[in-house]
Image: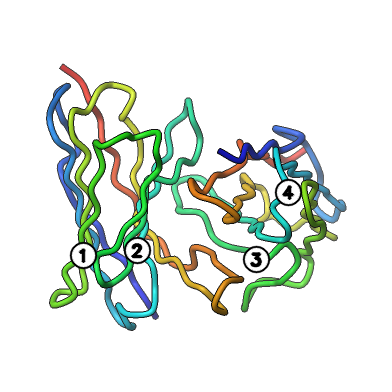
């Protein structure tokens, strides 16, 4: 299985801050990497697909980069609705796997 | 707007069979993959498996042979069966639509069900 490791596991930030989350794959997954945001009590929602493509309707403050084994999700200016948990997910090989999550909390 | 609505028993005893169904409203059932994903405090998000509309499926080997995913295209529904459940199967279970943007790139879960909490306890 391809293991996905996210860092940090949690962070505290303020509205307007720039936030970066990292996801590392245990093997080369090319750009087959998606990012999701999950608010409490809700299902995850896709933000970025194929490492760097913004899903339709997702605000442009979200961006993704990386390929191979190291990927990043950046939120350029944190908004109140962004205090949530973020997950990366690979689809290079079965089983599809998710990172452990990064919880973004209010400072 | 595509909607996925899921249902099934929320409380099971060890060794029983988990059974969940997900109905797809508004939108095509063809050309997508139909997935089950679960979330538990101990293991985070875990992909269980998927099926295409023909019933061809893939599942996570960690479930060994306990998982089966079936589709009913006449009702735009798909189902999950997980046999011989234990306390470790306690989780929120989600159904989700998987879409391919091209033949072999751009695969992600774009619509999800509301989630069903399944508790396994004697």
Q: Name the residue under label 4.
A: A28
Q: Nearer the viewer, mark 4 or mark 2?
A: 4
Helix, strand or loop at mark 4:
loop
Closer to the chain start, of discs 2 and 1, is: 2
What residue is at 47 percent from the left and 71 percent from the top? B99
**Quarter containing the N terminus of chain B:** bottom left
For the image, the number of numbered tags is 4
Chain bearing tag 3 is A
Q: Nearer the viewer, mark 1 or mark 3?
A: 1
Q: Name the residue under label 3.
A: A49
Circle 2/circle 1 CB separation < 8 Å: yes
Local crowd size for mark 3, using a 10 Å CA cut-off: few (<14), some (14–19), many (≥20): many
Whether labels 4 and 3 belong to a single chain: the reply is: yes
What's the CA distance linking mark 1 and mark 3? 26 Å
Residue B117 rendering spot, x and y as whole percentages: 29, 39
Q: Mark 1 points at which residue?
A: B71
Q: Is residue B17 above or below residue B51?
A: above
Circle 4/circle 2 CB separation < 8 Å: no
Q: Mark 2 points at which residue?
A: B34
Residue A90 rendering spot, x and y as whole percentages: 61, 52
- Which of the two residues, A59 or B56, is positioned nearer the viewer here? B56
What residue is at 81 percent from the left and 46 percent from the top? A14
Helix, strand or loop at mark 2:
strand
What's the CA distance linking mark 4 and mark 3? 17 Å
């Amino acid at each position: 299985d391809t293991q996905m490791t996210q860092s940090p596991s949690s962070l505290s930030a303020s509205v307007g801050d720039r936030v970066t989350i990292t996801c590392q794959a245990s093997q080369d997954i090319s750009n087959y990497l998606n990012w999701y945001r999950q608010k409490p009590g809700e299902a995850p929602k896709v933000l970025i697909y194929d490492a760097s493509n913004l899903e339709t309707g997702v605000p442009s403050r979200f961006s993704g980069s990386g390929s191979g084994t190291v990927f990043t999700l950046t939120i350029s200016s944190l908004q109140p609705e962004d205090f949530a948990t973020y997950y990366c997910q690979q689809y290079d090989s079965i089983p599809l796997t998710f990172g452990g999550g990064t919880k973004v909390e209010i400072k | 707007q595509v909607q996925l609505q899921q249902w099934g028993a929320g409380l099971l005893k060890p060794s029983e069979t988990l059974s969940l169904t997900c109905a797809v409203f508004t939108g095509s059932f063809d050309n997508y993959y139909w997935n089950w994903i679960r979330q538990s405090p101990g293991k985070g998000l875990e992909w269980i498996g998927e099926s295409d509309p023909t019933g061809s499926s893939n599942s996570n080997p960690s479930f060994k042979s306990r998982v089966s995913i079936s589709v009913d295209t006449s009702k735009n529904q798909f189902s999950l069966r997980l046999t011989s459940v234990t306390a470790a199967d306690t989780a929120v279970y989600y159904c989700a639509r998987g879409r391919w943007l091209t033949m072999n790139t751009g695969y992600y879960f774009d619509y999800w069900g509301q989630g069903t909490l399944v508790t396994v306890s004697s």
